[in-house]
Image (cartoon, rainbow, N blue to C red):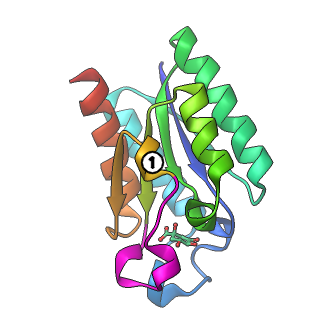
Amino acid sequence: MPKIMVLNGPNLNLLGTREPETYGHETLSDVESLCRETATSLGYEIDFQQSNHEGELIDLIHQAGLLVKSGGLLGVVFNPAAYTHTSVALHDAIKGAAVPVIEVHISNVHTREAFRHHSYISSVATGVIVGMGVQGYALAIRGLVQKLKG
Ligand code: DQA
């Protein structure tokens, strides 16, 4: 079965207990189940990853790029968390590896602090889903498949 990678950045391992008024009560494991159910219904497998380290996220994007080239991976649903607003290196990784990425944010970053209004990822993303809660991951998987497989 072809794969979709779902990649999560720093502090998302704390989902469920971290600022629930902003991010809700679902845990990262709930998000993983949601992603697997959604992908299975579309005929895809999920490679679900989380890291608190920028370099590890970059390595995973590079691996995703090689898999996309060999036909084993459709693309990446990516919540870069705080690195969204700081990481030129992740921007360059996505561009350099030529990976189709759907950027996801659980909260609506545009209604929050000004430092969350800019994303280094959006300009190299295929699509962006913001403020739809954890359901945004399911929307992103559907969007990736629809956009790339029509
Ligand atoms: C987030 C929004 C970011 O600003 C924040 O740093 C996160 C989570 C979201 O999913 O809403 O860690 O990406």
Residue at 59% across, 24% down: 65
Residue 79 locus on image (x, y percent) = 52, 56
Quarter of the rendering containing residue 93: top right
Asked if 43 appears above or below 17 in the picture, the reply is above
Can the viewer see residue 28? yes
Q: Which residue is mark 1?
A: 35
**Dot 1 lies on which element?**
helix
> Of 4 and 66, which appears nearest the observer?
66
Determine the main secondary structure of the stretch shown in magenta. loop
Can the viewer see residue 49? no
**Residue 114 covered by magenta stretch:** yes
**Residue 103 covered by magenta stretch:** no
Q: What segment is highlighted magenta in the picture?
A: 106-120
Query: Quick one: label 1, few (<14), some, or many (20+) residues within 10 Å?
Result: many
Residue at 34% across, 36% down: 144
Going by the picture, which residue comes out furthest to the left? 150
Residue at 50% across, 38% down: 76
